[in-house]
Image (cartoon, grey):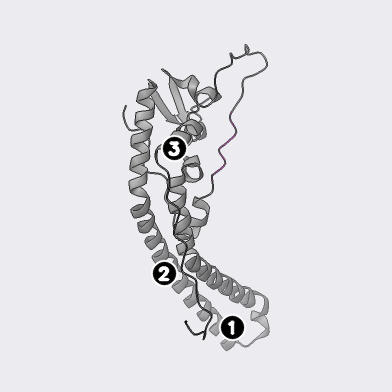
């Protein structure tokens, strides 16, 4: 089976908090009332054996424990930087709003200074975002690449064991208007994640060390 799934989506520090949340896939089209009733098939992808099957890789972020633990740890690691950037963005927006609402009530020199300050803050903030994004992208790739490779190999074995002739990323295919109907019986996502988690139990993420209050003495 040729590799059909590339590396999972990687986002920067400003959207890392979202990466561990399962994106909501688009609703799947259903058959019309004039279509003949579908024969019941076992859930969990059993109906995909020997056929075309579908998988929702975006569900892996939450559904595959080994990956979720790593992503949660990265979110916690980059949370202080995210808050720092958000605070600077808020300060910049406040300054821009001040220029808009009060610029006509002050001297030209004062307004000019505000504009110069806003321009410099925006330049520094843009640079900081670029730096943080590059750092988070690299860290995310370093941490998740080995797990992604394991998931791919396990997915390939899963398909070979079930004689699945072709596997498509269901959400991507639907967004590209390549699908008219997907039978739930051919969706292997939940069954694959259950099998993967059973074979690859995730170690719990280490808790960050407690921080001592400022000025407090260590025992």
- Dot 3 or dot 2, earlier in sequence: 2
Q: Check disc 3: other Cα within 10 Å, few if <14, some if 14-19, many if 20+.
A: few
Vertical order, 109 against 33 (above or below): below
Question: Which quadrant of the view contains residue 50?
Answer: top left
Specify the label residue 198 is tagged with.
Answer: 3
> Is residue 181 in sight in this rendering?
no
- Please check the rendered image and state whether residue 38 is part of the magenta-colored stretch, yes or no: no
The picture quadrant where one finds residue 8 is top left
Q: Position of residue 201 (x, y in %)?
A: 42, 43
* Magenta-highlighted residues: 22-28
Residue at the outermost top position:
36
Label disc, if present, on residue 127 of the rendered structure: 2
Question: In this rendering, which labeled residue sits more in front, label 1 or label 3?
Answer: 3
Q: Farthest front residue?
A: 219
Percent of width and height locating residue 149: 33, 42
Instruction: Tell me residue 88's x, y (percent).
Output: 53, 73
The verdict on residue 25 being magenta is yes
């Amino acid at each position: 089976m040729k590799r059909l799934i590339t590396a999972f989506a990687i986002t920067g520090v400003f959207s890392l908090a979202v990466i561990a949340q399962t994106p909501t896939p688009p609703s799947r089209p259903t058959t019309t009332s004039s279509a003949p009733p579908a024969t019941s098939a076992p859930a969990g992808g059993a109906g995909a054996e020997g056929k075309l099957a579908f998988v929702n890789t975006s569900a892996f972020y939450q559904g595959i424990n080994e990956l979720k633990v790593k992503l949660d740890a990265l979110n916690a690691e980059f949370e202080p930087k995210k808050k720092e950037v958000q605070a600077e963005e808020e300060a910049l927006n406040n300054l821009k709003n001040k220029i808009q609402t009060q610029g006509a009530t002050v001297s030209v020199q004062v307004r000019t200074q505000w504009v110069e300050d806003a321009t410099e803050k925006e330049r520094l903030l843009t640079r900081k975002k670029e730096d943080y994004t590059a750092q988070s992208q690299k860290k995310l790739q370093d941490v998740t690449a080995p797990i992604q490779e394991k998931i791919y190999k396990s997915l390939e074995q899963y398909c070979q064991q079930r004689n699945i002739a072709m596997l498509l990323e269901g959400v991507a295919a639907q967004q590209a208007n390549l699908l008219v109907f997907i039978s739930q019986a051919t969706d292997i996502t939940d069954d694959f994640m259950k099998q993967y988690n059973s074979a690859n139990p995730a170690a719990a993420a280490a808790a960050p060390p407690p921080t001592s209050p400022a000025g407090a003495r260590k025992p």
